[in-house]
Image: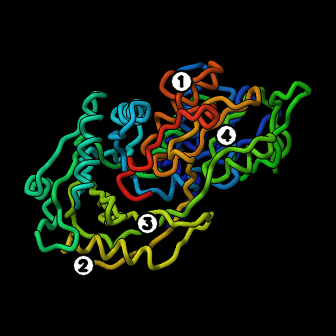
Amino acid sequence: MSHFSFPSLLAKAMGANKGWTRQWAKPQPKSRYDVIIVGAGGHGLACAYYLAKEHGITNVAVLEKGWLGGGNTARNTTVIRSNYLYDESARLYEHALGLWEGLSREINYNLMFSQRGVLGLAHTVHDVQILKRHIHANRLNGIDSEWLTPEQAKAFCPPLNISACARYPIVGASLQRRGGVARHDGVAWGFARAASARGVHIIENCAVTAINRGAGGEVTGVETTRGTIGAQKVALSAAAGTSGLMEMAGLKIPIECFTLQALVSEPVAPVFPCVAMSNTVHAYISQSDKGELVIGAGTEQYFSYSQRGPLHSLEHTIAAVCEMFPLFTRLRMLRNWGGSVDVTPDRSPILGLTPVPGLYLNAGWGTGGFKATPGAGHLLAFTVAQNRPHTINAPFSLKRFQTGRLIDEAAAAAVAH
């Protein structure tokens, strides 16, 4: 019987040679880099890739306190879309969706990107008004979006129950056909391989314990569990850990953390053709390539960094899903989990400069983080390289909380969070 080491299996699975695997698996951090990125999730690794590819900055270290892609990147529900309400959000997420559409070819990695369509279900007159407002706003921004009757929604998604006697009657639906899903952790692995091939160091099990600053207040590097690492530029992209990292630099940011619950069913044959989302019943559902139904619930109503939540929230979501899609009543839940989502007061991200020279921030994405992955990384890389925001992410600065020019996307998640 043959015995294989994990690195050799990983090399074959990633389509890389053993030399690259050894370089990525246990690189020794240098004493100094041009740029340090804190957080080896999808956003941080995308930033490293675009820094190298588009700005020629390859002396980059991505520091991760755990393992690559082991944070929120590994615990999201994979939905990708750009049908947000406000102009600023529409430009941001459409930029990301445009990158998604060519990303598998660009980084030569199968992300299982599937534009199967995202259906927003309406159950009430209020739902209809909100969704139609989104559709009109999307069209003004050149984003595909359309309204479906209950019969058209049923034709697009056959398992949908459009009975007038249903507890949650379907009175219509919005549809973005270019929306869809991708493999949640695949984007992290793909960007990691592409960034490493361009010379970026990805250093796991390397937690940041302090952010060092010079006499003028500028960033000079970080203290880590693997020693001091110097850099003139440090970009924070660590999801739930960002608030603590900002406090190390003497700054506080307006972010709260909630638990967002999700679950998957036992795998079955392909039966669900799209992504369906319902704001009224706090539920959204799609089917993965492995056959599991991926179901997301609403956020809990209290602050928490937990990876689990109370059972009654999941019971409500499962009951609603079974009402809307009776076909799934006999399925069994395979596993459930909770992800810590950071949200700002206006439910829009912070992406740009900070008051500390050389310190850059990417945080507060809430439920929008995965769908924004390539776009967030691309814009963060531009901001770090040019020391100024791109026109797309300029509205998402910290300053908006001082001026009051908020981008209130509380309803744009299409589920109640």
Q: CA distance from mark 2 to mark 3?
A: 17 Å
Contact between labelled residues 1 and 4, with CB atoms less than 8 Å apart: no
Query: Does 305 sit above or below residue 335?
Result: above
Query: 5 or 46, which is in the foreground?
Result: 46
Res. 5 visible in picture: no
* Left or right of 253, for residue 416: left
* Left or right of 100, for residue 149: left
Answer with mark 1 or mark 3, whichever residue precedes in sequence: 1
The amino acid sitting under disc 4 is Leu
* Left or right of 38, for residue 190: left
Residue 329, numbered label: 2
What residue is pinned by disc 3?
262
Query: Which quadrant of the figure has residue 355?
Result: top right
Viewer-nearest of discs 1 and 2: 2
Q: Residue at x 53, y 72 (%)?
A: 309
What residue is pinned by disc 4?
236
Q: CA distance from mark 1 to mark 3?
A: 35 Å
Residue 53, numbered label: 1
Answer with mark 2 or mark 3, whichever residue precedes in sequence: 3
The amino acid sitting under disc 2 is Thr
* x, y percent for residue 211: 81, 40
Q: CA distance from mark 4 to mark 1?
A: 20 Å
As helix, strand or loop, the secondary structure at mark 3 comes to: strand
Q: Residue at x 27, y 28 (%)?
A: 140
Contact between labelled residues 3 and 4, with CB atoms less than 8 Å apart: no
The amino acid sitting under disc 1 is Lys
Answer with mark 1 or mark 2, whichever residue precedes in sequence: 1
Answer with mark 4 or mark 1, whichever residue precedes in sequence: 1
Q: CA distance from mark 4 to mark 3?
A: 26 Å
Q: Residue at x 67, y 47 (%)?
A: 242
Query: 273 or 244, which is in the foreground?
Result: 244
* x, y percent for residue 278: 30, 59
